Amino acid sequence: MKNIVLSGFMGTGKTVIGRKLAGRLGVRLVELDAEIEKAEGMTIKEIFSRFDEPYFRDRETAMVKKFAIQDNVVISTGGGVVLREENMKALREKGVIVCLKATPETILKRTSTSGKRPLLNVDDPLKKIRDILDYRQPFYEKADIMIETDSLSPTEIADEIIRKMKELSG
């Protein structure tokens, strides 16, 4: 089976679903944001405040290239990984891109308890979510598989991804 690459906006369930899939399939989970934090010795929030978004995106691309060539992994990406075509090209080499989707309201509910979301440190986070989603939507739609996560449990989402992966592999 090809690698499973989870993409989608923050709060769509990439980390939770990644863990569930890796456990069910007996493969390793690679969380790109966690790998960046480990390599940089600071949190994503600290990277954004100390440097800037382009600096972070460069680190992200380096991690994509490092892990996209591995076999038998589930890769959980950051929400903005889709913005660079080189990232998607590298991830597609050995992987199937699965985009997890949710409504802006669901995303806000899921992310509001976390102070780890630097892009949402604004006065109107719901508007910010809508604006970023509108911009990123064409990138997310290039995924091989799209899954709506609003009303599904993590187990149901994992089941759906595995079912669709089997369909793709014939």
Image (cartoon, helix red, strand yellow):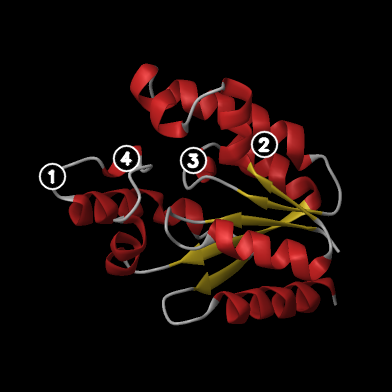
Q: Quadrant of the N terminus?
A: bottom right
Judge by depth and name the residue closer to the eye, 113 or 101. Answer: 113
Instruction: Give the side of residue 143 with respect to residue 74, left or right.
Output: left
**Mark 4 touches mark 1? (CB < 8 Å):** no
Residue of label 1:
123
**Residue annotated with mark 3:** 83
SS of the residue under disc 4? helix
Residue named by callout 4? 119
- State the residue lying farthest toward the left: 123
Label 3 and label 2: CA atoms lie apart by 13 Å
Choose between 2 and 19: the one closer to the eye: 19
**Front disc: 4 or 3:** 4
* Most distant residue in the top direction: 51
Q: Would you call the spot at circle 4 few (<14 residues within 10 Å), some (14-19), or many (20 or more)?
A: some
Residue 64: which disc?
A: 2
**Place of residue 124 in the rendered image (x, y in percent of width and height, measured from the top left):** 14, 50
Residue type for callout 1:
Asp
Examine the rendered structure and indicate whether residue 61 appears above or below residue 113. Answer: above
Front residue of 142 and 98: 98
Label 3's element? helix
In terms of image quadrants, where is residue 90? top right
Residue at coordinates 67% horizontally, 67% vertically from top-left? 20
